[in-house]
Every structure is written in structure tokens, then in C-alpha cells.
Amino acid sequence: MDRRQVLKSLSAMTVLGMTPEANLLAKSLSNTTKYSDLTQVQQNFASALANEPALLGFTDVKSDFKPQELTIEGRWPKELTGAFYRNGPAKHERGGQRYKHLFEGDGMLQEFTMADGKVRHRGRFIQTPKFTQEHQAGKFLYSGPDSRLENSLGVASPNDINVANTNIIPVSEKLWALWEAGSPALVNKKSLDFEGYEVIGGTQSYGQSLKGVPFSAHPKIEANGDIWNFGLNPTGHIVLYHLGANGKVKKVKVIATQYQGAMLHDFLITDKNLLIILPSIKSKRSHKNDGFFSSIEFSKQLPMQVLLINKEDFSITKQYELPAGFAFHYGNAWEDKDGTVHFDASLYPDLSVLTALSDVMQGHDLQGATDAQNVLVTLHKNGSHSMLNTMVNSEFPRVFSQVTGLKNQTLFHVSNETGKMWSDRVSRFDLSSQSYQHYHFGDEYLVEEHIPIKGTGKQNYLLGTALNVPTKRTCLNVFNADALTDGPMARAWLPYHIPLGFHGNFVKG
Amino acid sequence: MKKRTFNLVALAMVMGNLHSFASEAKDIEFQIQGINSNKGKLYVQLFKGQEGYKNGQAVNASIVNAQKGEAKIMFSVIEAGEYAIRFFHDENDNGKLETNMFGMPTEGYGYSNSAKPNFGPATYQQIKFNVPTGAQKVVNKTQVIY
Ligand SMILES: [Fe+2]
């Protein structure tokens, strides 16, 4: 598809206006909460922290973490060589003010490199222009999606407040730090320096037509290296990307949907289709001062919609309606020869989690929020569907990268058994026997995303971080992925804790 | 005398007016800073009052070759009152403001008072400025938003 065709598909949008006055940012980022007192948020959190040590995972990080070798407990597998990168919000506070939502903080990259059974770590803030300016000023200069400043510098485009805080993937020689409302932030692998925002297709015939267009934080990378992704404009328009392993555009298309949720976090691929899953949420923003996240509401009347989109030409081939629900994350999808599609979702029955991730910034625990559960969905050729709820709490679902879009035998996720602040165990679900293995870390751990990695031969690993609250230290854990109940094979301990983050990926050395 | 055309002829006429009506005319000197290259042209539009701005009816306009750094655009007006300016840097010289697939500008643009959009378009209130009765010259400064 050439650029002209792409632009043609946008004709409906062009009438919305192409001048700065009419730019769609008005819709995409407009509207704010009341000029809230971010100082009060900071004070509320500080006093709550004094009584609830588990809030440690949400404290502000003051500076980068210097490179150092970690203390190994057990024996770190020597064949596990490479770098494990994680990303997450870390700069929550400046100048006595604190952001109102967990999604707002500037991203910090955590790098764990491993070789010869040794593990090294360093942590570096992603030095976006926003980060650098605010760092120099010693205070917030820009409003965030929910946290509005009375004298914010102008936010003319999403990249002005791109915090690059959600995921990190290797593309070509760079790392792409991802945030769902803006462009990939380019990070140098050696120095971890920020090197600007990727202009997708910028060196191709696409020119600047994709500059600043959202590229979600959950691209799916096929075994052949091709990168598939989407980006949402709150108007309901969704851009679909098909990139090569080198980040160059193979094709791109914008589709129009009726989606009014304003937030779309993850999606799925099979070998033939993309699955764009529109949860039952609606943005109720009506005033400039309404917050972006705080204006999103769950709508019981709204079915969850699945759009099946052909990978060849990005045409919508089928639509399914599921019962009302919400999910941030899906593990994997695949389809049978007859076109039956299967996928899993860490499915919430409501949207209380989104509010809880704001409340936690004020020092409240997450107990009031409903947990997501691992639900298996089958979409039948005749338009019907079936769903199986495993009734097991689930978040951050992952599969071996080799089976992305293909049938997976196993699904790994974290899970909340008794924890009130984050997850406390890792889980392995066997899809053929529909049976589970769990490893409960204990109440004193806050367990982050764990990712499965294929080793040589039959050995598979599960790798992820956890924060030990009493000792205020974070450890990197490695499990035998097929024997979680044995507990970790080894742990690599930092002498301090790092903030709770979102997603990571392993790059083999 | 309202000029709605957007061309160099209009500009030439304004320059002419500068001389013939020097005693009555008031000058608006619009300083654009932060121009990032010599490529293309700057398209600058002057509006009178909120209505004129809302309706997109410029009372004057100027097109100049872009020069890296700073540009000074002169407008001459007869009437005192509220004015507003918007402009864009047509870097690829095709006569229009380029936008991305979601309609966001991908070339430089800006407004009087160095106003910047903030989670939405810049408002007339942000960009208006006054040319007082009796004033001979009003200077307004801005920065290109890239
Ligand atoms: Fe995510």
C-alpha cells in the first residue's frame, strides 16, 4: 500500500481540519481534572507510606542506578546470556508535588545483563526533552494526562509529554521505549542515552505522515521478526502498523471505529489476522478540566468488541461481541485451519483497577479493586463465541516469544493470591491439560511481570523481578519454567529496591 | 480596505502603504524566533478581532522566504484595536501546512504572543494583542512550534 492510498483512507479525517486550530490533539489530550493539589497528593502518600511499607514500590526515584554486579543466591544458569530490559514509571514526584496516576511518571529503564552465571544491573531515566527540562527546573513543567498544573508549559502534541514508561523492545541497533499515546523513544543500547523519537516511515515514502502518530506499547513481534502494532486516536480512528524487523514500514492503514474508550492498551495477532479488542469503556470527558484517565468509565451495556483484521490488507473481516469486560493485557492468540480463533485475556469485570492505580498514588492499597482473571476465549466461524474462566487471578500474561500468533502450550502470568498491593505469585497454565502450577513468593514480595525464555535443549526459563518489602531490595528471579513449584533456581539481589514497573523483554546475547 | 488575499501582491501593497500613510498607519512588527532552517517559506496571517479570527478572514497576509533563526514581519494597519496572528513554516514549499495521519501539524507553526496549544488549540484569548490608538509601532514576539 503506498502512502497515497493510506491518505485516501483518511478522507473522513481530513474534513475534521488540518490546521493547528482544528488539530485532533484537541480531542486526544484535551480536558483536565480540576487543578488539583499535587502537593496534597504528595503529602497523602508520604504519610500513608509511614504506615504501609508495601507502598515502597510506588515511591519516587531520585536518580539513576549505577552499574553494579548483583549478589547471586543459588546458581544462575550459565547458558542464560543476554540482557533483560524492563521499563516503568519512576519519576513520580518533583518539587514536593506528586502525580495523581501511576501511568504518569517518567520512564526508567532497568537493564540486567547476564553472562557466565553473573548478573549486572543499571537503571537510567529515559532522558526525554520533558524529563531533562523538568530535571533542570527541579519541578514539573508540563501537565500530565490526569495531573494538571496551573501554569503548565503548552502541550501541543503528545510527544511533548511522552514519558516512554511502559515497554521496551529491541529494534535494529536501538531500543524503543514505548508509551501508548506517542512515538517510540529511541535509546542507545550502550549508553542508554535518549536519541530522539522515531519517525516511523520517515526515511521512506511516508515522509512525516506518521510523525507523532501513537505507536502502542504492546507491539507483537512474530518469529520472523516482523513487528505489528496499532495506535489509537481518541476519535476512534486506529492506525495499524506492519513493520519489518528493522523498523521500516511494510504497510500502514487507518481504520475508523466507533470506539469511545480513549484508551486502548494491547492487541493480538494470529498467523492470519490482527485482533483489535475494544473493551466496554467510554470516556465521559466533557470539560477541559476533566482528567484523561479519571474520565473513563465502565459501561455494562457495551459489549466487548473483537475486530478480526486481515494481516494482508488490514481489512476488517469479522466482528464479534463478547460480554461487557475490560482488559489491559492479552497473552496470545492463534487460529485453527478452519478459522476458529483462540485467545486468552486477563479480564476484569469492571474498571475499578484504573481508579485504584490512581488511589495508590495517594497511598491507598489496591484491595478495593477487582482482580483480573485468566479467561480463555474461542471465536467460532459462525460468529458465536465461548469463554472459559479459569477463575485464577491474572495479570501480565506472557508466552514464549517464538509462539507469538501461533498455538501456545503454556501461558505464564503473575497472580494475586493474598497480596493487597501488587501480585504475589507466578503462574504457569498448561492449555492442553488446563492445569496450573503456581509459585507463591510470600506476602512480603511484590511480584512483577515474568517472561518465559527458551533455553537450549528442553530447558526453559521464567525470568522476572520482585520487590522484597521488609529488606527493601529487589531481586531478579530465574525459574525452571516447567517446574515453578520448585521455586526460583536462582535470585540476583540488588542492594536496594527499584520501582514497580510494567513490561520487559529479554535480548539473547 | 480589507485584503483577504494571501499573496505577495498584498504584501507589496502593504509596503507601499507604509510610505504613503506613514503618519496615520500603525506598524505591527511580528518577530518570529526559532526558525529551524532556510527551507521553504513562512506564511503569516493577520486577523482583526475575534470574529475575523473565528471566520479565518485575514485582513493581511505575508509570505517570506524562511531564514534559519529569526524573521521580522511588518504589517501596517490603520485601525486601532485587537489583532491576532497565526503562521506556519512551509518547510517543503508546497503551499500548505503538512499534517500527520491523525491531523496533527508536522511542519512548524505558531501564534502571536508566543501562544502554544495546551491539550487543545490555542484560543483567541491567548493570541490576541492590542494596537492602541495613537501607537505608531507594536512589537509582538513568538517562537515556532515544531
Ligand atoms: Fe501493558
Image: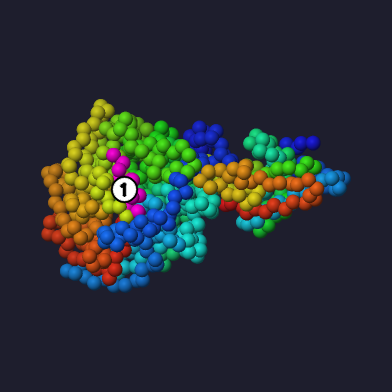
Label 1 marks which chain's residue? A
Coloration of the structure image: rainbow
Q: Secondary structure at mark 1?
A: helix
Q: How many labels were placed on the picture? A: 1
Q: Amino acid at mark 1?
A: Ala
Q: Does residue A484 appear in the picture of this structure?
A: yes
Q: Does residue B93 appear in the picture of this structure?
A: no
Residue B97 position by quadrant:
top right
Answer left or right for A327 relative to A483.
right
Q: Start and end of the magenta stretch?
A: A350-362
Crowding at label 1, few (<14), some or many (≥20) Cα neighbours within 10 Å?
A: many
Answer left or right for A458 relative to A215.
left
Residue at 56% x, 36% y: name it: A17
Residue at 44% x, 64% y: name it: A193
Residue at 38% x, 51% y: name it: A101
Residue A78 position by quadrant:
bottom left
Magenta-drawn stretch, dominant element (helix, strand or loop): helix
Q: In the image, residue A382 lies at what x, y percent?
A: 25, 27
Q: Is residue A358 magenta?
A: yes
Looking at the image, which is closer to me, A241 or A143?
Answer: A143
Answer left or right for B134 relative to B88.
right
Residue at 18% x, 58% y: name it: A443
Looking at the image, which is closer to me, A182 or B143?
Answer: B143
Residue under numbered circle 1? A356
Q: Is residue A431 magenta?
A: no
Looking at the image, which is closer to me, A313 or A184?
Answer: A184
Q: In the image, residue A391 lies at what x, y percent?
A: 17, 42
Q: In the image, residue A184 lies at what x, y percent?
A: 43, 53
For the C terminus of chain A, which image quadrant?
Answer: bottom left
Looking at the image, which is closer to me, A485 or A27?
Answer: A27
Q: In the image, residue A155 lies at what x, y percent?
A: 52, 50
Q: Is residue A143 above or below residue A272?
A: below
